[in-house]
Amino acid sequence: MAAGLVLCTSLGILTYRMGKQRGVDFAGLEQGSAPPGPAASQEELEAARRDRDTVEAKLAERDKAISELRREVAQQLNENAKFRATESEQHSALQASEEEKKRLAEERDGFRQQAAAGQAALQASEKRLNGLEQERSEDVLQAASLEARVAELSRTVKDQEGTAELLAKDRDIRELMGARDLYITEVYDVARTGETQKAFGRVFYTKGKSLIFYAYDLNDQPGLKEASTFEAWGRRGPDWTQAFKLGVFYEDNVSKKRWVLKSNDKRTLDQIDAVFVTVEPHGGSERPTGKPLLFAYLKVAPNHP
């Protein structure tokens, strides 16, 4: 009974400590990490991925060491229980002869020493296990931070690659990048609830000279008919129905669902203060009739070069 009590107590303490540590791990994972800075490059992304892989390898090594220590602790608990059971049996046998009593007493003392050594080894193993689990908790937090960094860098690099692709493909945009009074902005379709919809666009505007409007995922709008036309308008004042017709979008990259519209009508561009997109019947309309999808205000200061 004494050996069973000692075994239950040891297992209870170990289970409490491991549960407590798992709580720390869970709470640490929920804290997240501070968002990284806006600057990013392919090299930073690769470096972040390497750091993440290193931490994950460390986690795997620590998990293996923790598993081995747990098996060692269980084995030591079992051996300690055997020692105590044998000690109890030897104590009962001390009722025999004096010589037998002496021999049994010596054996009992030896078992006690072995049990004490086993208890010391168990405590040392528990200490090492707690240390490894603490280190694992720190590694988990670092891995989560690196994973978030990799995701953020991936998004930034993807955006940069999208702009670079447009610059490499479109001669007009390459010329725009060296122009004065250039304004570049990204626009998104926003629902009445304030949530961003799927369609989005990128506008390259040189004041009074040219407008290039790239739009993505226009044909993914709910309830859209195949015969619909996407048309761009230049707004002049608060009355949207009096907007100038800038032209119809055409799809220049089917796989990426990218559409484009270009306007070099200087007279029209001088009069408008914003540009927006609507869905119109096949062939287009003379006045906007559909709900605006994308809207970009143009009466702002240039942000390039």
Image (cartoon, helix red, strand yellow):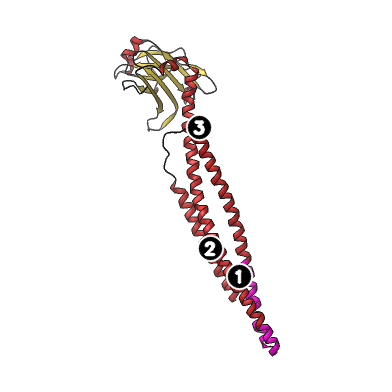
Q: Nearer the viewer, residue 28 or 46?
A: 46
Q: CA distance from mark 2 to mark 3?
A: 43 Å
172 to the left or right of 239: right
Residue at (49, 30) in percent of width and height: 158
Q: Mark 3 highlights which residue? A: 42
Q: Is residue 85 magenta?
A: yes
253 to the left or right of 185: right
Percent from the top left, x then y, of residue 219? 49, 22
Mark 1 belongs to which amino acid?
Gly
Residue 115 seen in render: yes
Percent from the top left, x then y, of residue 268? 34, 11
Residue at (50, 41) in percent of width and height: 147
Part of the protein shown in magenta: 76-104
Q: Mark 2 highlights which residue? A: 127
Circle 3 residues within 10 Å: few <14, some 14–19, many ≥20: some
Percent from the top left, x then y, of residue 197? 43, 29
The outermost residue toward the left is 237
Mark 2 belongs to which amino acid?
Lys
Q: Nearer the viewer, residue 17 or 242?
A: 17
Q: CA distance from mark 3 to mark 1?
A: 54 Å
